[in-house]
Image: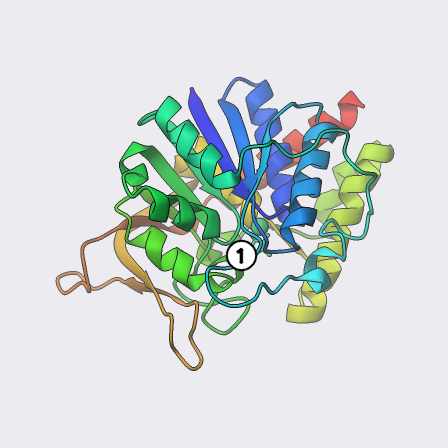
Amino acid sequence: MIKLLLDVDTGIDDALALFFLAHAQKQGQLEILGSTTVGGNAEVAQTTLNTLKIWEMLELEIPVASGAERPLLGPLETAPFVHGDDGLGNTFLSVPRESASEESAVDMILRLSHEYFGELTLLTTAPLTNIAVALLRDTSLAGRIRNLVIMGGAVFSGNVSAVAEANITNDPEAARIVFHSGMEMTLVGLDVTHEVYWEEADLEPLVKIGNERSAFLLQIIRFISAAYESLSGWRRCVLHDPLAAGVCIFPDLVKTEKRYVDVELRGELTRGMTVVDRRGRTPLGEENMQVALEVDAERFKTRLMQSLLAWTQEG
Ligand code: BDR
Ligand code: CA
């Protein structure tokens, strides 16, 4: 069974990923060993509270270890216009009953990598700061991880700039460290996540449920859809982080190519861009990760909706 540790900046689409993973755990598809948090969509104090709260809503006792407050260099830029002032669509949930664990995010990552040597799947849906700091403390971490699935980057087109994606741009130096670590990696970037989204009509099954749980989900999904509309013109909830979670369990949801990928650190217009060398014989370096380029969007959207409906019907 898949042993999973996730690193998140919860965040609306991170939250949807947690719902999906919780359902998969119930179905015996994986075991969630822990969760670590980082500043990204909101300050780390808030992403930690949000992660604790979502686990509580799901009635799961999964430890949450708080991590980096800011990127390795420079200040943190949060995204209240996309995820709300509370990171969860201004739903302003009550304070969670549980607190973050005593252990730091980096300590949790390193400990679990020893306890589950060669077995651990790491999922990151956030800036890569915690993973980079763990690698700086102990480079041998890379050899103990079975696979790192990263929601981040893009081959063809960015979101926070013409060429760069948010999670990588929020800490490009950390991404550089991780990309060069030698870890087994799969990059689930905008090329595939932008193909997987819900529009209002897709929400019909949730609308029909009509209880408190479905109301919460609809509120966060509609909040991010409206934000996306003002940024891009398309009113839709793009399922970035849930798709990366899906790939951890069902790798065949995406078609990948093994490529050399690096991160632009200095470009005037391109800082944070993932540079994917797709040339056949003259790569910039050794291929260092699988890059997702095609996705079975319908299959995943159905699965994700099923996991949300299951939770709303339990309550
Ligand atoms: C990524 O950036 C964050 O805002 C989302 O939660 C997702 O992880 C998409 O670029
Ligand atoms: Ca995220």
Q: Residue furthest bottom?
A: 268
Q: Residue at x 49, y 63 (%)?
A: 165
Q: Residue at x 41, y 68 (%)?
A: 273
Q: Amino acid at mark 1?
A: His
**Is residue 213 toward the left or the right of residue 152 in the image?**
right
Answer with the quarter of the image where residue 315 lies: top right
The residue indicated by pointer 1 is 194
How many neighbours does mark 1 have within 10 angstroms: few (below 14), some (14-19), or many (20 or more)? Answer: some
Pick the residue in front: 211 or 72. Answer: 72
For the N terminus, the image quarter is top left
- The percent position of residue 55, horizontal first and vertical second, equals 68, 30
Q: How many marks?
A: 1
Residue 102 to residue 230: above or below: above
- The percent position of residue 80, horizontal first and vertical second, equals 71, 61
Q: Residue at x 52, y 17 (%)?
A: 28
Q: Residue 284: in sight, yes or no?
A: yes
